[in-house]
Image (cartoon, rainbow, N blue to C red):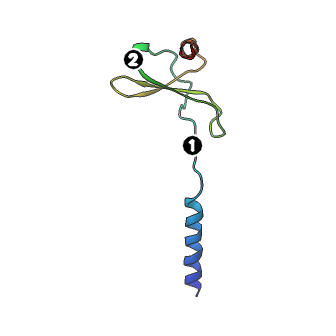
Amino acid sequence: MRSAAFILLACLLLVDVRGMAISSRGRCLCMDAGVNFIKPKLIKKVEAMYPSPSCQNLEIIVTLKGSGEKKCLNPASWFAKNFIKDAQK
């Protein structure tokens, strides 16, 4: 009887855990301030991650052409500010 109750309890816990919402980001993707400049002709894609409960920083992730490498761009740099301003136009 005890083993049946234990199995039932374990199944209920597994169902509860699998139904929980999981944040897609988790933590901050950029561990440091990031680079201040990247040649615009090397940029393939730019993603902006706005502050959220899991990460309080604005993160700008740049994917480079060719290698597909991702780099963090320092949002406080002159280049990033101008790049964002131009992209909004």
Residue 24's quadrant in the figure?
A: top right
- Residue 59 is marked as none
Q: Quick check: 86 above or below 69?
A: above
In the picture, the disc for residue 26 is 1
Q: Residue at x 57, y 77 (%)?
A: 8
Residue found at the very far front of the displayed protein: 89
The residue closer to the viewer here, 72 or 20, is 20
Which sits in the foreground, 16 or 36? 16
How many other residues sit within 10 Å of disc 1, few (<14), some (14-19) or many (≥20)?
few
Which image quarter: residue 70?
A: top left
- Give the spatial CA distance, label 1 vs label 2: 28 Å
The disc label shown at residue 42, or none: 2
Q: Do labels 1 and 2 touch, CB within 8 Å?
A: no
Kind of residue indicated by mark 2: Leu
In x, y percent, where is residue 18? 55, 60
Q: Position of residue 20 (x, y in %)?
A: 60, 56
